[in-house]
Image (cartoon, rainbow, N blue to C red):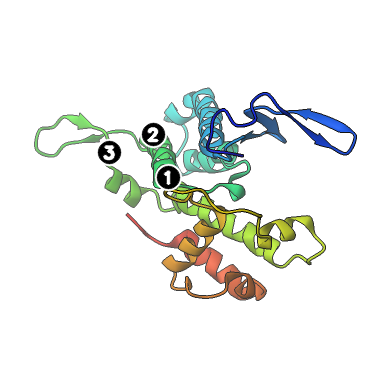
Amino acid sequence: MSRDQNAGRIHSVGIDSSTFERVEEFKYLGTTLTNQNSIAKEIKSRLRSGNACYHSMQNLLFSRLLSKNLKIKIYRTIILLVVFYGCETWSLTLREEKKLRVFENMVLRRIFGPRRDEVTGDWRRLHKEELNDLYSSPNIVRVIKSRRMRWAGHVARMGEERGVYRLLVGKPEGKRPLGRPRHRWVDNIRVDLQEVGCGYMDWIGLAQDRDRWRRLVSAVMNLRVP
């Protein structure tokens, strides 16, 4: 992984007696991995799949025979699960969070429909604040944060012999490149804990208490933010 687009483009990687072609990106277990370790393409791919799922169900979301509560259940149990695939490993930036909220607002506007303006009498689409009031469930970003924290707790409680745990606590050799550092996965965990007043604590030690960690996961998900 390198910020240099041309780094190692023509070289292969040798592991034991096997040789692997070096590529810019590839899919592994349905997740897009890039040579720059960027999650942007993966989120774009998941939103594209969620969009396709949404359009395939527009007849149901349009139907007047179904209640709004049932349409919300369809959204949460079918469409959202397509978007959430692998979200526990995402390191979100504000840009990605905005894209996710835009997608969710698009679906919610289809579910709740337009609203008639009391002054002009014209129909208009619902504003974000109105959607937040109508949609009583945690928004898409809060759910992703909670799923990521839940997974972080599982990893933190693994033994040292587990490869996933060693990757979590391991320190790679070398120095981080100059310039603004990338937002790492563990940075997201610390920010999420800071939102609920636990950002100063050792989160790996905190996760050993399952009950307390479960309450923190719930607090992160249900936190009401603009």
Nearest the camera: 149 or 205?
205
Q: Measuring from the top left, give residue 85's x and y in whole percent.
A: 62, 41
Nearest the camera: 174 or 80?
174
User: Residue 126 — which label?
Assistant: 3
| Above or below for 212 versus 48 | below
Disc 2 secondary structure class: helix
Sort mark 1 into few (<14), some (14-19) or many (20+) by Cα contacts within 10 Å: some
Q: Is residue 151 left or right of residue 60?
A: right
Report the residue marked by disc 1: 97
Report the residue marked by disc 2: 106
Residue at the far left in the pictured view: 119
| Above or below for 206 versus 38 | below
Q: Name the kind of residue labelled 3 in the image.
A: Leu
The residue at 13%/39% (across/down) is 118
Q: CA distance from mark 2 to mark 1?
A: 14 Å
In the picture, which quadrant includes the N terminus? top right
- Find out whether the residues at labels 2 and 3 contact each other: C-beta distance under 8 Å: no
The residue at 36%/38% (across/down) is 112
